[in-house]
Amino acid sequence: MVDINTAQSKEPLLPIHEEATTTTNNTSSVLKAIIANKYIQIASGPLASALICLFVNGPSSSRNMLAVLAWVFLWWLTEAVPMAVTSMSPLFLFPLFGVSSADSVAKTYMDDVISLVLGSFILALAIEHYNIHKRLALNITSLFCGDPLNPSLLLLGICGTTAFVSMWMHNTAAALMMVPVATGILQRLPDTSNMSGNNTDVQRFCKAVILGVIYSTAIGGMSTLTGTGVNLILVGMWQSYFPQEAPISFSSWFMFGFPFAIILFFVLWIVLCLLYLTKSMGKSLSVYLDRNHLKRELELLGPMDFAEKMILTIFGGLIVLWMTRSITNDVPGWGALFHDNVGDGTVSVMMATLLFIIPNKKNDGEKLMDWNKCKKLPWNVVLLLGAGFAIADGVHTSGLADELSDSLGFLKTAPYIAIAPLACLVSATITEFTSNNSTTTLVVPLLIELARSMDVHPLLLMVPGAIGAQFAFLLPTSTPSNVVGFATGHVTIKDMIKVGLPLKVAGVALIALLMPTLGAYVFGTDKIV
């Protein structure tokens, strides 16, 4: 039997140390909870917004819009809440801050550009579901492989395939498709982690391939409207700010974007060949990688079935309809038959609808696509585009663009030929620290107001600003495509800077060359709007 008095005598009368320990543990737990739940990041948006409302002078409409911008961009930068949730925040922030009505801001989240994105994403999911992208990659890569192995041609084939795929779908989706294809080819090579030294042929080739893939997704996306959200934001802003002007069609952008992308693509290939490929590389790699390996992969996929052929047919038809809807001012496209009421989004959704009508001839009653396969639709990108259009509209209508455009006043004193490259350089610098879409959303409205004050064509600044926002070549966190490639472990930040910096310089120089020449022909930038 236990003596109660004895037991009690062993207990401390004043458990001071235990309380102190408990208090310390509780404080530590609270701090950990605050950090883990991102309460600081969440509070940063409303706090910055409140500080701007209290201490920033100026018209209430532009001040409130600046407060909303600070809230949204801080949440985007800190990832306080999921990106898609942040992208929906203008739906409640704009009405609460008096920037615009609920109906007005909601309408910016669905227009022809958003329809274009939705239809393209559904088609991209169909291509991914039936492994068409993998078949395409293996066919083109085996074509460029060479016999004996030619590393520079193989690199050209992999990068060229990636750029082509990225022309027709979002950069991130293209990277997610093509990086596994590239790593699948590299897996036939020996494990580079067990090799001594940093200059082995295998390591250098792996770096060249991964860098080539992630940068080719960005370059390929520049050539078409569907390749990246930045181009779509540009088109949406042009229509919003200048509704009386002819819209930028798929074909007109292609006439400028494709030559630009082709030249920059070959610059990328040359830089990679000079920095990473050696003359002896073909001999050392041919032991592990040759055309027979690629042919075996193709044989495993089997012949193309009816479903794959139909999807390629729909895909080809969509491209033709995009290219011929509006050809030139003198030669109207098929859109004139419908009094120009149709847009690129009309075609995109119409062709995507066929995927849910045509059977795949695999199982009775089964179509090429069903809605269950569309659950992977990247709604975060769609909402991000909507938020970009809402912010651009708010910056314009609130008068904030007029206030902020003064910060870019140094462009007014620049020579005419230097205006485009300087606008491109501003965006290319900012985009390393924010997303491409965010950079475009912030910078392009300012460039529009600046163009008005300078009496130059707005597209002379808008196009370089939008393209510059896609030059996110230096850091892995600059864009999701870079993250996908960086996650393979084959490249380092030093590698990205070594290739990305000359690529960025070449891009700005190319803008300086093409905007006064090809840009004047395609967009009429030598005229006044």
Image: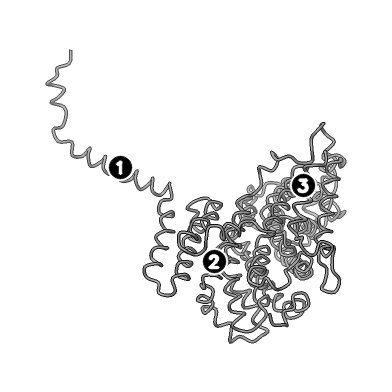
Label 3 or label 1, whichever comes before in sequence order: 1
Q: How far apart are labels 1 and 2 at the CA level?
A: 45 Å
The residue that mark 3 highlights is: 353
Q: Quadrant of the N terminus?
A: top left
Label 1 or label 2, whichever comes before in sequence order: 1
| Label 1: element kind | helix
Q: Is residue 173 left or right of residue 24?
A: right
Label 1 is placed on what type of residue?
A: Asn
Q: Dividing the picture into quarters, in which one does residue 279 lie?
A: bottom right
Q: How far apart are labels 3 and 1 at the CA level?
A: 57 Å
Label 2 is placed on what type of residue?
A: Gly
The residue that mark 2 highlights is: 394
The residue that mark 1 highlights is: 26
In the image, residue 320 lies at what x, y percent?
84, 59
In the image, residue 308 lies at what x, y percent?
83, 44
| Foreground pick, 30 / 92 | 92
Q: Is residue 363 left or right of residue 5?
A: right
Q: Nearer the viewer, mark 3 or mark 1?
A: 3
In the image, residue 128 lies at what x, y percent?
74, 45
Residue 407 makes an appearance in the image = yes
Label 3 is placed on what type of residue?
A: Thr
| Label 3: element kind | helix
The structure residue drawn at horizontal position 26% and vertical position 41%, both measured from the top left corner, is 21
Label 3 or label 2, whichever comes before in sequence order: 3
